[in-house]
Image: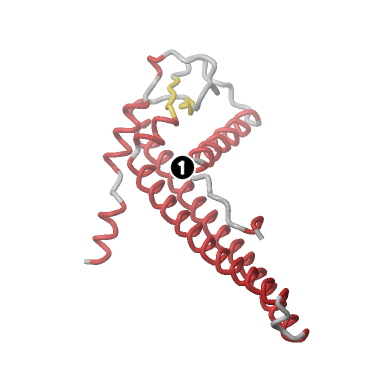
Amino acid sequence: MKNSIFRPLAIAAMATLALTACDKSQSQSGNKSEGSAQQAPTNLKIAYVEVDSIMSQYQFCKDYTQILQKKGQNIQNTLGERQKQLQEAAANFQQKVQQNAYTREQAESIQAGLQKQNMDLQGLNQRLSGEFQKETEMYNNALRDSIQHFLATYNKDKKYSLILSKAGDNLLYADKTFNITKDVVAGLNKAYKPVVQKEDAKKK
């Protein structure tokens, strides 16, 4: 029974998923370049953005991390309460069976009911987990899109040939003069409309 309890969801995976999405986008872009007959420019203007700083300073990430954490906790509470009730019912059933409080038919009927509750709980676990995962993916897609949209606008003036994402030590070395993280975080926050304001606008 304990194995069916919904395990705590790793909200920090949001950063990983977003980074993966960005890396895939860069990888696809790189593949297209390899297949092109055009020659790469000799003078590249390169910049990089620290993904960890975006995740910790971009208000979008802060807001939705809190939203997902709250929803994840609600899911755990719901499933935990259902699991507790089922365990108590199962323990009570075993006690009465030992006391010969049921006929054979009654015991079989109650046992079948408990098994069905367990299956229902597992189904609920899978459904809520799937819904949470889809919602997390939706927020990650929105995060990726907001970053890419901002960089497309930002780069109209800056004219960078390549903007890299730096997470941990995926870049072995990078001169800090190429770091545009502060500009990007400031620009993202300026363009972002907080979730609370959006919800208030809907109510009006």
Q: Residue sitting at 37 percent across and 30 percent down? A: 155
Q: Residue sitting at 67 percent across and 69 percent down? A: 119
The foreground one among 132 and 54 is: 132
Q: Is residue 118 left or right of residue 156?
A: right
Q: Is residue 200 left or right of residue 7?
A: left
How far across and down, in percent of the image, does residue 56 sit? Answer: 38, 35
Q: Residue sitting at 45 percent across and 20 percent down? A: 46
How far across and down, in percent of the image, does residue 139 sit? Answer: 45, 50
Residue 179 placement: quadrant? top left
Q: Is residue 9 left or right of residue 94?
A: left
How far across and down, in percent of the image, does residue 200 sit? Answer: 24, 60
Q: Quadrant of the C terminus?
A: bottom left
The foreground one among 40 and 71 is: 71
Residue for badge 1: 144
Q: Amino acid at mark 1?
A: Arg
Q: Secondary structure at mark 1?
A: helix
Residue 100 versus residue 59 in the image, above or below: below
How far across and down, in percent of the image, does residue 159 sit? Answer: 39, 26
Q: Quadrant of the N terminus?
A: bottom right
Colouring used for the render: secondary structure
